[in-house]
Amino acid sequence: MNKLHEWPEPIVRVQSLSESGICSIPDRYIKPATMRALNDPCIDEEEDEHVSIPIIDMSGLDDDARRATTLIQISIACREWGFFQIVNHGVSPELMDRTRETWRDFFHLPMEIKQDYANTPKTYEGYGSRLGVQKGAILDWSDYYFLHFLPLCLKDYNKWPALPSRCREVFDEYGKQLVELSGRLMKVLSINLGLPEDHLQNAFGGDNIGACLRVNFYPKCPQPELALGLSPHSDPGGLTLLLPDDNVAGLQVRKANKWITVQPAKHAFVFNIGDQIQVLSNAIYKSVEHRVIVNQSKERLSLAFFYNPKSDILISPAKELQTPERPALYQPMTFDEYRLFIRLKGPQGKSQVESLKSPR
Ligand SMILES: O=C(O)CCC(=O)C(=O)O
């Protein structure tokens, strides 16, 4: 655990590097050739409308005539994609815009103000510029802000920015609405897995779940072809609701060895399954690898809201989803133990969840 007390090297803010006017990026942001986006087969949704993550209208769940079809759409999207956009989800569009703009204003505050919130790897809360503590690691081209909404014992306004002055009020309301939406989605996933509607929520710890936000800020990058904003990873937690930038695309999702660039729909959230739901569903649903590319002329901001199990509860495949032909694929593990991996090693594709498969 000692390793998590301090960063292994002095922290450099990517935004400061970008704003310093450099024409070439430092070596420690240059990805090996095999990881560069240019070397991979990619599909841009804008260019190929037949290849895109599904978009699902959640209002169908509240309409008797459309509910069954909407449940099926979500079921197919979870099984085939693990990633989809949701519209008419009940979160106020005005609140979505206000929250994103408030964070944008935060990242444009003078550096000395942001530095007051500099984080450490122990809890990651606050203003950060790297994931993982491996000395000499090749870093991603992004800064971020990480904060907790739940459990309430971890919610600490002193660790939230005080500026812009509206931010605590705006983020509180945003967190409230996203916790509600995540709870609805947990019910839908339970029903679609053939479980009682509260099954997944109870397995996560009932009312004692965790919820946190990472706001990612990807500054302009003078050599975007050499860097990544966020390296390939699956999300370690339960489920994620991403509010992407409304001006610039960047998120890419891996599907059958190709990377698909997501074109965000207006006021949609990008939903994705995390590793804990993969474990609970005994891999009927899978978390999906994704990454972020960067841009030479535009900065990008995204808000990733993570809905997670209570940190000290054991998570294992639901008994109802085990059969003699398909016994439990994973050993029980708490989320506290599980997330140590990404906290130590940073984003590493799907290597963690894959390595946890029970020996046969
Ligand atoms: O910026 C994005 O679009 C994705 C962010 C993400 O994958 C994450 O924060 O885990």
Image: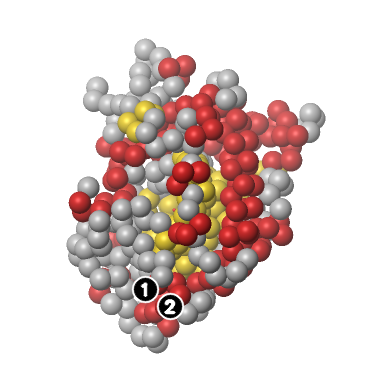
Nearer-N-terminus badge (1/2) = 1
Which numbered circle lies on residue 111?
A: 2
Residue at 52% of width from left, 61% of height from top?
302
Q: Going by the image, does 258 lie left or right of 163?
A: left
Between residues 183 and 257, which one lies in front from this camera angle?
Answer: 183
Q: Secondary structure at mark 1?
A: loop
- Pinpoint residue 217: horizontal percent, then vertical percent: 47, 67
Question: Where does residue 261 sit, x and y in percent of width and height?
Answer: 51, 58
Q: What residue sits 35% from the left and 18% below the top?
A: 327
Res 13 label: 1
Q: Secondary structure at mark 2?
A: helix
| Residue type (three-letter) at the residue carrying disc 1 | Arg
- Give 10 or 19, whichever is nearer the viewer: 10
The residue sitting at 45% across, 69% down in the picture is 218
Q: Is residue 12 in view?
A: yes
In percent of width and height, residue 103 lies at: 55, 66
Marker disc for residue 117 = none
**Given the image, on which type of amino acid does mark 2 rest?**
Met
Q: As displayed, is residue 278 above or below residue 9? A: above
Locate the C terminus by quadrant. top left
Label 1 vs label 2, nearer the camera: 2
